[in-house]
Amino acid sequence: MKILFVGDDWPGSNARSLADGFTQAGHQVVVVDSTPVTLPPRLSVPWTYSKLAHRRAPWQVAAVHERIEAIAAGFRPDLLFAFKSVHLDQGRLLTTPAARRVHYSPDDVGNPYNTTADYLTHEPEWDLIVTTKSYNVPELRARGARSVVFVRSAYDPTLHYPCARRGSRRYLVGFIGACRPDRRGPLVDLARYYGDRMLVRGPGWRRVPALHRTGAIVGGPVYGTDFSASVAAVTANLVLLNSDNRDTHTCRTFEVPAAGGLFVGERTGEHAALLDDGRECFLFTERAELDAILTRCAADRALTERVAAAGMRRITAGRHRYVDRAEEIVDALV
């Protein structure tokens, strides 16, 4: 197929990896970058406008649509694929010339933060809604979606693979991901105990003074191969979920093992189905259980290496790449 793909195209973004996945699956793909609308630079005029007006800058939205329409006129796509394009003009998107139109939601569409009034009004007009949240399937159908398919998150083998550490420092425990209210307290408490044996990286963590006072090593976000290098520096890589999204798995579920990291994650049905607890990962429900896991990790390097290697084999052999997800989505259109 000829696919016009609308999504954030910055290096390391999940949208870019999925667009590449469609290409690897044999389709002709042209990408329109929606980043200027979805992620305007902090303190820029569009960013300030979005904070004050509670909507995206209309001139940025118009510019993205003009590019979509100009490309569609010459490319004549079979499929318009919109990756979390809720901040674009839905009516305008849905009149883009294409035989089929698909919207992909990587986050919980039951969470108002991940939708807009405009998107919800037009949601039933999409030919297919793709969600990475299994519980969203009946909810979307109840809201009137024409067709819904669930696909899991994925990893990108060009970005997520075992790689050399940058520097000799190794941490017992680490977390790479955004600072969120449900994560802040538990991670600060964990850092108070593990101090400089703990690494925390991701958006927002450097603005948490209590975390700096623990002695933990705190850094900004890392993406792509930089993410994999950070995983390599950590013995136990925490896979924490987003409670606002009612997550039962996340991109890190696949990215950490694919990068060769030891998966130490929250116990959910999906995590237990994807990886064998104690053999391919370590799962926990409460802090005491996590502390016991970390004590084992600190005492038995051979065990951690064996479990990490088994987890990597399970994930990389299991059709969890973005190209595999692209094929699942195309199959759902048949």
Image (spheres, rainbow, N blue to C red):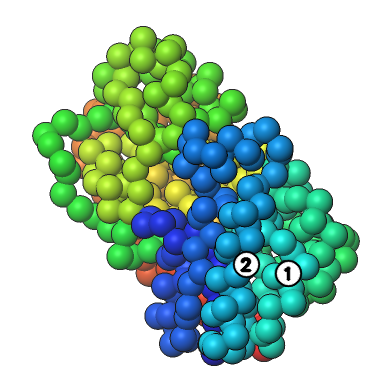
**Can see residue 213?**
yes
**Drawn side of residue 222 relative to residue 51, left or right:** left
Q: Amino acid at mark 2?
A: His
Residue drawn 81% across and 51% down? 117
Circles 1 and 2, Cβ within 8 Å, touching? The answer is yes
| Residue farthest toward the left in the current orientation of the protein | 168
Residue drawn 54% across and 39% down?
45
**Residue occupied by mark 2:** 65
| Mark 1 residue element | helix
| Residue 63 in picture, x, y percent from top left | 58, 62
Q: Is residue 302 left or right of residue 76?
A: left
Disc 1 from disc 2: Cα separation: 8 Å
| Residue nearest the observer in this picture, 55 or 8 | 55
**Residue 239 — which label?**
none
Task: Residue 61 in the image: state x and y as whole percent.
Answer: 63, 57
Where is residue 287? Give x, y as percent. 50, 23
